[in-house]
Structure formats: C-alpha cells, structure tokens
Amino acid sequence: MKIKVGDKVYDGKDEPVMVILKQKEKKLIADMSPKSTKYCMYPDKEYWTKDDCRNIKAWIEDA
C-alpha cells in the first residue's frame, strides 16, 4: 500500500503506513470499481473552479 500526502508518497514496504477511515469512506471504497486503485480526499470548498478540478486530477494521476 502506498499513501500520498501532499506531494510525498509513502510506501508501506519501506515504512509503516496507516489509513484511518470513517464508516462513510469505507462504504465509498467498498463501492469502487474493481479496476479503481486510488481513493482521494481533499479539503472541502464552497465552489470548485475548472482549474481546481484539473489540479486535483493531475495530483491524483501523479501518484
């Protein structure tokens, strides 16, 4: 398992990593497509611009 925080990726093979999930997050992960391998959480904003969405997508794809 790998965890990405900001721009740093931590690999469970090299150091202990842990994800602490809420019940809602467990449900969302359980409902993911079998082909999906990434789940992302980011700060909540009242309004997301197209640039915000592009930046989040690029951040996810960079892992």
Image: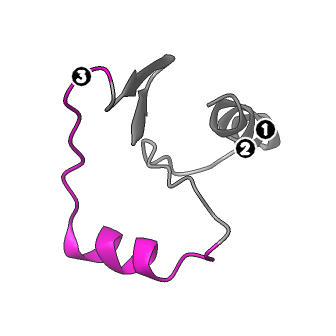
Q: Which residue is mark 2?
A: 53
Mark 2 vs 3, N-terminal side: 3
Image position, residue 10 (x, y; %): 37, 24
Q: Dot 2: what SS?
A: helix
The CA span between labels 1 and 2 is 4 Å
Tell me the residue at 81%/43% (across/down). 50
The residue mark sitting in front, 3 or 1, is 3
Mark 3 vs 1, N-terminal side: 3
Question: Could you tell me which quadrant the C terminus lies in?
Answer: top right
Q: Is residue 18 or residue 1 the one in the foreground?
A: 1
Q: Which residue is mark 3?
A: 15
The residue mark sitting in front, 2 or 3, is 3
Q: Residue 31 lies in magenta, yes or no?
A: yes
Looking at the image, do the residues carrying marks 1 and 2 touch, with CB atoms under 8 Å apart? yes
Q: Indicate left or right for 3 with 53 as reference.
A: left
Image position, residue 29 (x, y; %): 43, 71
Answer few, some or many: residues within 10 Å of disc 1's Cα (few below 14, many 20 plus, some between 14 and 19).
Answer: few
State which quadrant residue 13 falls in. Answer: top left
Q: Indicate left or right for 25 with 15 as reference.
A: right
User: What residue type is disc 3 on?
Assistant: Glu
User: What residue type is disc 1 on?
Assistant: Arg
Q: Which residue is mark 1?
A: 54
Answer few, some or many: residues within 10 Å of disc 2's Cα (few below 14, many 20 plus, some between 14 and 19).
Answer: few
Image position, residue 60 (x, y; %): 64, 39
Q: Indicate left or right for 61 with 47 as reference.
A: right
State which quadrant residue 35 falls in. Answer: bottom right
